[in-house]
Image (cartoon, rainbow, N blue to C red):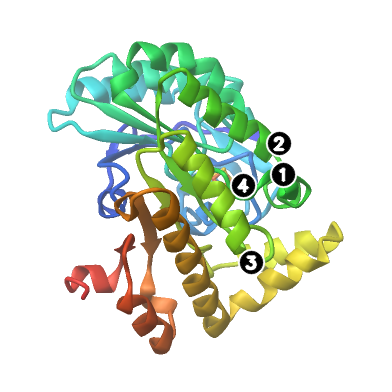
Amino acid sequence: MKVYEYALKAGITRTKEFERKKLATHAVNVGIRCGHECTYCSTPSLLRMHPAFKALGLDPFDRGYAIVDPTTPERVARDARRIRERGMVQLCTTVDAWSPEAQKHDLGRRCLEAILAEPGWTVRILTKNAAIIHDYDLIEKHRDRVLIGLSITATPSMDEVISTIEPNTSPITQRMAAFWEAHYRGLRTYAMFCPLLPKVSCMADSVDQLVRLAVECDAEEIFAEPVNPRGSGLRITSEALSRDHHYDAACGVIPIRRAEEWSWYVVRLLRHLQSSVRAHSDIGRLRFLLYPSRLIPEKLEEIRRDDAGVIWLGKLQRQGAR
Ligand code: SF4
């Protein structure tokens, strides 16, 4: 993994999109290309026009590199002091503050310190790296102001498959251990199951195991989102799975590149989540993030008949949805 450094301008920014998702009002990002290199990551598409790629002579769709900004904590500290209207900051929204290249500069901890030094801010951490446990001592000092989310995308039985599609993240077993440790230490947690892929983790029993983990760890909210079908993420994912001989998983992913199969997958995933959350917890804790524009009309109607836990995004939300 080649790591580039690039000085960004933003520290803490407002994010209407994450506010609509009920995740956060503000965002901090410590770079523009995450070294975890998940095959389905939508950041390369999202940030493809960023001037950093041209300046560094990089193709935004190539793989094998990360772009990090070691000076991020300084701008975060400046903005944490300067912004008057404070709220919840998500660390991070387009990269991961505990990815290997971010760890090298201790960016997760230093950004946390910068935000928490100022009153009025709370933080939502989202990471796929168990290295977050090294910062639990700091979080303990601000335990009411920090929500910890380990993004967990399968059960431990799928660790090998996950190491193909999330190659530089912590294994699922370690992420789960970090989640448990947060709970044992009395820290606030929320669950993030995204994405749960067909034949990898969206089967009823896998979803049920994950929901039970969230409930046992007292997760305040249970977020889930179907995989984004746009861009090249699903193609790269299915190619990587085939290359590593995970043919069953590859066969689950290939069809959902088409709108009809993606719609079936979304309904199945939602129903498994609703049924498990209803069985083990309160459906009010479920937050299923859904952009309905790619759903075929029949499946959109089916979801509308029972959309408990769904946060409608995009066009439907702007129209006041139902
Ligand atoms: S951890 Fe998140 S930001 Fe990093 S590559 Fe994976 S999906 Fe993208």
Q: Secondary structure at mark 4?
A: loop
* Residue 185 to residue 230: above or below: above
Q: Secondary structure at mark 1?
A: loop
| Quarter of the view holding residue 178 | top right
Task: Label 2, secondary structure: give it.
Answer: strand
Q: Which residue is drawn at the image coordinates 75% and 50% (left, top)?
A: 164
**Residue 242 image position (x, y, % from top left):** 82, 64
Which residue is the site of mark 4? Answer: 57
Instruction: Please state the horizontal and vertical placement of residue 154, each as a whole percent of the image.
Output: 63, 50
Which residue is disc 2 drawn over?
2
- Residue bearing mark 3: 198
- Between label 1 and label 4, give the one nearer the viewer: 1
Of the four image quadrants, the one with ligand 1 is top right
Q: CA distance from mark 4 to mark 2?
A: 13 Å
Q: From this viewpoint, is residue 4 visible?
A: no
Amino acid type, callout 1: Pro
**Sequence-earlier tag: 1 or 2:** 2
Does the rendering let one see residue 130? yes
Mark before the other along the chain sequence, 2 or 3: 2
- Identified by mark 4, the residue type is Gly
